[in-house]
Image (tube, grey):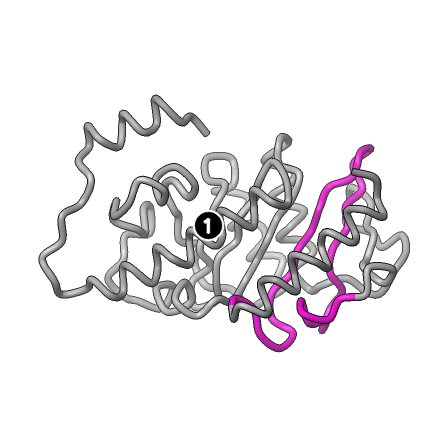
Amino acid sequence: MNENQLREQIAELGKSLYDRGLAHGSAGNISVRLAGGDFLLTPTNSCLGRLDPARISRLDGSGKLIDGDPPSKEALLHLAMYQERPRSEAVVHLHSLHAVAVSCLADINPADVFPPITAYAVMQVGKLALVPYYPPGDAALADAVRKLAGKHHAVLLANHGPVVAGTSLTAAVNAIEELEQTAHLMLSLRGRPTRLLTAEQIAELNRRFPS
C-alpha cells in the first residue's frame, strides 16, 4: 500500500474498533511504519472513530513530527516497539474494557498474564507480558516496553491497556481483538474449574504456527 492507502486503512480500522466498543473517546492510538523508516500515528486527543486520514501525524524514525497534527502522547511507546521489532509494520494500543480490567488485577503473572485458555490466544497473542505502571506518555513507560518488546509482540500496560505489534495493520488489529476476547474469557472463568491447554498442546501449536 502507498501512504494514502495506509492513512485510509488506519481511519477505516480505527472506526471499526470504535464502532464495536473496543475504543472510546480519545483513548487508543494506531501507527503504521512506512518504507524508509518514517511512521504514521494517530494524532493526540483524536477519536479512533472519527479520524481524518489527511491529518494523521507523520513522524521520522526518531519520533520527530514531519507533518500532520501533533501526534499521540504515546509516540515514544510506538517508536520503542518498532526499534525492537524490525519486522513489525504496525502497532495498536487500546484501552479496551476487559484487557484493562485484567491489567488491574493484583494476582496475575507478570511474565505470562493469560492462562492458556484457547489455541488462538496462544497463536495470536503468545506470552503476554505485564509492563509496570508509568504515567501515559512517560519516557520511562517507553523504556519499560522496550525491555520486553524483543521477546513479546504483545504487552499489557499495568492499569492502562494492551499494546500489540504486527507484520501489518490488519495482523495487529486481529491480534489485539484476540487479546481482548481472551481477557473477557479469563475474567468470565475466574473462580471456576477450567480446562487449560497442556504444555504439549502449546508446543504443538507453536510448532505448527510459528510467530
**Callout 1 secondary element:** strand
Q: Quadrant of residue 29?
A: bottom right
* Quadrant including the N terminus: top right
* 145 to 22, vertically: above or below: above
The location of residue 78, given as percent across then percent down, is: 64, 50
Q: Is residue 189 magenta?
A: no
Q: Measuring 71% from the left and 63% from the top, which residue is drawn there?
A: 72
Q: Measuring 61% from the left and 62% from the top, which residue is drawn there?
A: 16
Q: Measuring 34% from the left and 55% from the top, which residue is drawn there?
A: 182
* 195 to 68, vertically: above or below: above
The magenta stretch spans which residues? Answer: 22-51
Q: Is residue 41 magenta?
A: yes
The location of residue 143, given as percent across then percent down, is: 57, 49
Mark 1 crowd level (few <14, some 14–19, many ≥20, 10 Å Cα): many
* 18 to 2, vertically: above or below: below
| Viewer-side residue, 93 vs 169 | 169
Q: Quadrant of residue 90?
A: top right
Furthest residue to the bottom? 25
Which residue is identified by label 1? 155
Q: Measuring 49% from the left and 52% from the top, which residue is drawn there?
A: 176
Q: Is residue 196 left or right of residue 84?
A: left
Furthest residue to the top? 207
- Amino acid carrying label 1: it is Val
